[in-house]
Amino acid sequence: MSDIQSIRTQALERLEHLSTLEDAQTWEADYLGPKGAVKLFQRSLGSLSAEERPAAGRAANDLSRELTEAFAPILERLQAESLTAGMASDSIDVTLPGRTPTVGAAHPINAMIDELIEIFAHMGFQSVFGPEVETGRYNFDLLNIPADHPARDVWDTMIVQAPNAEIIMRTHTSPMQARTMERMEPPVRVIVPGKAYRFEAQDASHEWQFTQLEGLMVDKDVRLSDLKGVLQEMARQLFGPERKVRFRCDFFPFVEPGVDFSVDCAVCDGKGCRVCKYTGWLEMGGAGMVHPNVLRGVGYDPKVYSGFAFGLGIERIIMMKYGVNDIRAFQANDLRFLERFAAAGA
Ligand code: DAH
């Protein structure tokens, strides 16, 4: 009996000092578990005399109940405490600044195409898109470049289907001139943004894949001055209201007269600087009045209709506008380059 008294005293004493969930689990195993002191005592009852046994048995049962009842609220409290402690260490500090998610942005070329589509839409031009794998007929023949014409060599062509070179990667967006006119009656006012391909040695200003914007307007009484007005408006929208456009004679088989056109340099206001190589002008592309043979080729009567066409390099415009000095950067996939445009909201 003295045994059970000392178990009780010790158990209650330790119970008061339990401070962690682990302590509580140890205590429970020590006293109430299958190998705990109370169980061991109960197992030892067999060695007592018949007179002593009932009272000792009752005392052991009472103690088991008493300890179980005393332990329950303490265990509950320690469990709750350990739960909140865990939550505190894992919890989110809502006062910390958030992590900015990485948001993608349009590639600078696509952003510039969108900008050009918008500018030309305001002048009544619709955007059309054509195949990048072309036939010699559309890429050359219908553009007044016959098979034996020396100008055909100028477009270093990537041949898709040998041997007769009829299936090629388009070398410019101009084939869409004929494709569009075949499908439409005048008035025609379209732009054609898209990729073009040339078998070329790469350097800071040449890529074998690049992007062009073709323009075509055909109607009655379309003149060179209309071409100049449209390109001037484009230059102003892109580079600011002060910009001027310059035409110089040039040759392209599908226009007559043909010109190359430049915009006066926005960096130095045409005075001459490093960006414009001290000329005051930045060359943007080729243009001209649609050649009568091209009109005839698609069934338009050149005595009734006239038109202008132009073609420019989209990478070049971006390079001028943002001071990029290597065309290879556009396809190099270097995030440091691309992020400059994302930040500029381009
Ligand atoms: N297709 C020509 C090229 O890639 C550019 C060009 C010149 C397009 C004159 C035109 C044009 O529409 O009229 O070099």
Image (cartoon, rainbow, N blue to C red):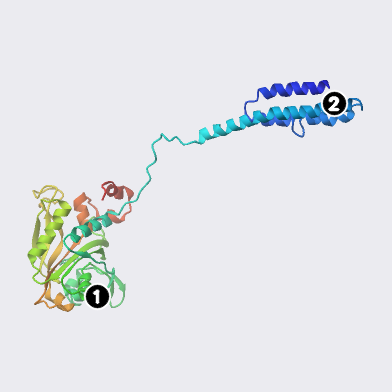
Q: Are marks 2 and 1 in contact (CB under 8 Å)?
A: no
Q: Which residue is mark 1?
A: 136
Q: CA distance from mark 2 to mark 1?
A: 111 Å
User: Which residue is pictured at 84% across the width and 31% down the height?
Assistant: 43
Q: Which residue is mark 2?
A: 56
Judged by depth in the image, the label closer to the viewer, 2 or 1, is 2
User: Which residue is pictured at 22% across the width and 72% down the height?
Assistant: 180
Asked if residue 32 is positioned above or below residue 147 in the image, the reply reads above
Asked if the beta carbon under badge 2 is closer than 8 A to the nearest atom of ligand 1, the reply is no
- Please state the horizontal and vertical placement of residue 152, each as a whole percent of the image: 19, 72
User: Which residue is pictured at 89% across the width and 25% down the height?
Assistant: 52
Count of number-bearing discs: 2
- Please state the horizontal and vertical placement of residue 227, each as a whole percent of the image: 11, 64
Asked if the beta carbon under badge 1 is closer than 8 A to the nearest atom of ligand 1, the reply is no
**Dot 2: element:** helix
Asked if residue 89 is positioned above or below residue 239 in the image, the reply reads above
Q: Name the quadrant of the N terminus.
A: top right
Q: Is residue 328 visible?
A: no
Q: Is residue 314 visible?
A: yes
Type of amino acid at the residue the image marks with label 1 = Gly
Residue sitting nearer the eye, 83 or 176: 83
Q: Quadrant of ligand 1?
A: bottom left
Lower sequence index among marks 2 and 1: 2
**Dot 1: element:** helix
Residue sitting nearer the eye, 281 or 103: 103
Say whether residue 282 is left or right of residue 97.
left
